Image: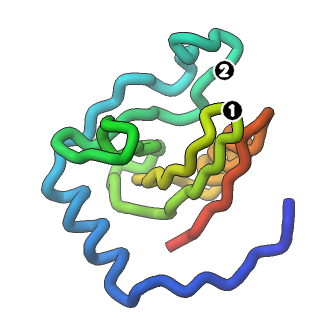
Amino acid sequence: MEAAVPTVLASNIWEYLDRLVAASRLVIDRPRGSHHPRYPNIIYPVDYGYLEGTTTVDGGGVDVWAGSLPNKSLTALVLTVDLHKRDVEIKLLLGCTEAEHQDNIEFHNDGLMRAAIILR
């Protein structure tokens, strides 16, 4: 794993993301342990879904990884670059433990995809 790079975020970005999460229903469409619909060798290490009523550039909802902590507050962001799809995305991690953060970053740093995590 590469050394952490200091990040500078707008002082209230976490507040705005918290407001977005609080105003949206979490939909889990790929539970922990399930296989990707098109790539059966990909297994989701943490519940994966989206925030209903939100949008992103690809037309879907904001992507979310929901961990095992009972409180589904925002714990981190994952920034991904996918050379296969030729896109960049931001994914929210809600209620994730340190181990789930690690599982998530390992999941995204495979094949033609790379990712960085920004911890709250």
Describe the element under mark 2 as helix, strand or loop. loop
Placement of the N terminus among the 4 image quadrants: bottom right
Left or right position of 23 against 38: left
Percent coordinates x, y for residue 96 in the rendering:
50, 52
Query: For mark 2, does the 10 Å Cα neighbourhood hold few (<14), some (14 to 19), or many (20 or more) residues?
Result: few
Tell me if residue 10 comes above or below residue 81 in the rendering: below
Left or right position of 23 against 112: left
The amino acid on which the numbered mark 2 sits, given as a three-letter code, is: Ile
- Alpha-carbon distance for marks 1 and 2? 15 Å
Q: Residue at x 75, y 44 (%)?
A: 109
Q: Name the residue under label 1.
A: 84
Q: Name the residue under label 2.
A: 42
- Which color scheme does this rendered protein use? rainbow
- Which quadrant holds residue 20? bottom left
Percent coordinates x, y for residue 112 in the rendering:
76, 37
Percent coordinates x, y for residue 21 in the rendering:
25, 56
